[in-house]
Amino acid sequence: MNEQHYAAIEAGGTKFRVAVARGRDIVADTTIPTTAPDETLGAAIDFIRSWGDVDAAGIACFGPLDLEPTSPSYGSVTQTPKPGWSNVPVLDAVRSELGIPAAIEVDVGGAALGEWRWGAAQGLRHFIYITVGTGFGAGLFIDGKVHHGMGHPEMGHIALERVPGDDYPGNCPFHGACLEGMAAGPAIGDRWGAPSAELGNRPEVWNLEATYLAQALRTFTYVAAPERILLGGGVMQQDGLIDLVRSKLVNQLNGYTTHDLLRGSVEDYVVAPAFGQDAGLIGAIALAMDAAES
């Protein structure tokens, strides 16, 4: 049994979830509002210190991040609309303050790693982990690792074909009506005048949402050819939404496929994450384990 202790940080734009784990099992955790970097990172580090010695730390962090290991700013948030967080060296702050090995990955990449190691993507070589919430994030996992090219993928900023009759301009500050600007939680609230959690009895809301998500999944399917797509996040907690997305994806594919996974209901192709809203934190534990071993 793994008796090492790990620190796990799921660093989000609105809150940090911080945990100490014995092996994979969380023994203590807390939630810290995301305010100024010094304040938020300081509170996270203080919580970890309060539990004594840990062997390594893992950070699943909102982005964009510099994930090029040879870069002087490796492990830093780059240009983000989150006030005060651009160019913050998150990885260096955790390493230097705790004096332990640490690893960082973009939040959805970390969640993908956790789901691959212990969850709904075990045994797969290629898959995509998606979260639909305050933003739209996707981690592309290829041949046993999270994919990085010139940076981490930003699948939430692909273009969409507008549904006829939908005149919402989109709320992405960079692209307007991109996927995130049309289908993430804030876009739903802005378009319909209420938070998504209060719109459960409005089928027109979820029909439109599922249409845009299915468009995106069709694009990801044809571009990346994943063995599975994990579809999670706060928006996906709406009852029946994942089934509606599956149905619309089948219609979007329109029979054009060469793989049995894409025939029929695609229930084994589009699935919910095993760890639900905890996927990012579990992924941070997996990152910490890898840091300890390396």
Image: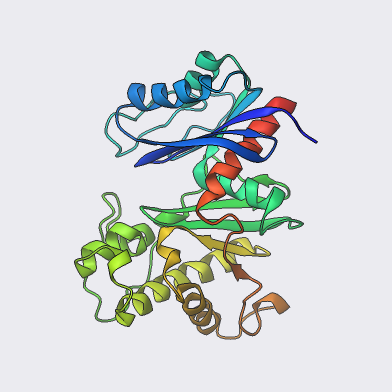
Farthest right residue?
Answer: 1
Left/right placement of residue 79 relative to residue 152 reads left
> Which one is nearer the viewer's eye here, 28 or 209?
28
Q: Is residue 9 visible?
A: no
Closer to the camera in the image, 139 or 152: 139
Q: Position of residue 213 (x, y in %)?
A: 44, 69
Above or below, comparing residue 263 to residue 283 in the picture: below
| Quadrant for the N terminus in the image | top right
Q: Quadrant of the C terminus?
A: top right
> Where is residue 202, by image quadrant?
bottom left
Residue 119 in sight here: yes
Image spot of residue 210 (x, y percent): 42, 74
In the rendered view, would you say 2 is above or below 114? above
User: Could you tell me how many numbered marks the image carries?
Assistant: 0
Q: Colour mode?
A: rainbow
Q: Which percent across, then down, holds residue 197?
A: 32, 65
**Residue 146: x and y, percent?**
63, 45
Residue ID at (52%, 82%)? 247
Q: Is residue 264 left or right of residue 178?
A: right
Q: In percent of the image, x 30 and y 32: which residue is there?
A: 35
Vertical arrangement, residue 217 with respect to residue 234, above or below: below
- Name which residue lies at 41% across and 69% down: 238
Q: Is residue 23 left or right of residue 43?
A: right
